[in-house]
Amino acid sequence: MIERLQRDLELLRGRYPDVQFRKEGLWVFLPGYIVSSGWERKKYDVCFQIRPGYPDISPYGINVSPPPRRSDGTPLKDYADNPEPKPPFEGAWGRFSWEAAAWKAAPDLVSGSTLLNYVESIRQRFEEGP
């Protein structure tokens, strides 16, 4: 898993050079992630945790700071403020329940799903709206 994770993080850094990885807890942090219109802000910090069993099992959840709000005040679905486990990064956090729909494990980064695929799927969640 460690070698695969390192290659996966390198691929992710190619698109998101500011990405940070915290080995303790296997957390991935993306500062200033740009989201679709309709949200209170244009950018949020996002992070997620890599679950045991990766790469056979996808990451789960999207932690967002500051906690997101829709510009029209619509309540958010599948969302909780102050999630547990709390992300190990500064700020107040909220979490969307989210899992990449088409995660396909493979030993290589060409034929299987990657952390980059997961991060791109986060955009899909924001486009869905509340």
Image (cartoon, rainbow, N blue to C red):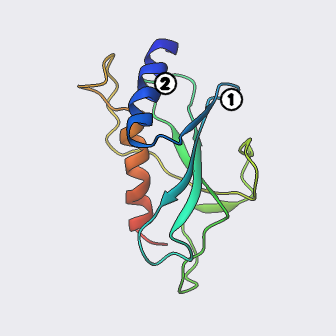
Q: Is residue 39 above or below residue 72?
A: above
**Residue drawn 70% across the image and 26% down it:** 24
Q: Is residue 114 above or below residue 4?
A: below
Marking on residue 25: 1
Q: Is residue 126 above or below residue 53?
A: below
- Residue reaching furthest bottom? 72
**Residue drawn 31% across the image and 24% down it:** 109
Q: Is residue 69 left or right of residue 130?
A: right
Residue 95: % across, % down? 62, 55
Which three-letter amino acid code belongs to the residue tagged 2?
Tyr
Q: Is residue 128 left or right of residue 25?
A: left
| Upstream in sequence: badge 1 or badge 2 | 1
Q: CA distance from mark 1 to mark 2?
A: 13 Å
Question: Mark 2: which secondary structure?
Answer: loop
Q: Is residue 89 left or right of residue 121?
A: right
Callout in the foreground (1, 2): 1
**Residue drawn 71% across the image and 52% down it:** 83
Which three-letter amino acid code belongs to the residue tagged 1?
Gly
**Residue 16 picture quarter:** top left
Q: List the residue tagged with mark 2.
A: 54
**Residue 50 picture quarter:** top right
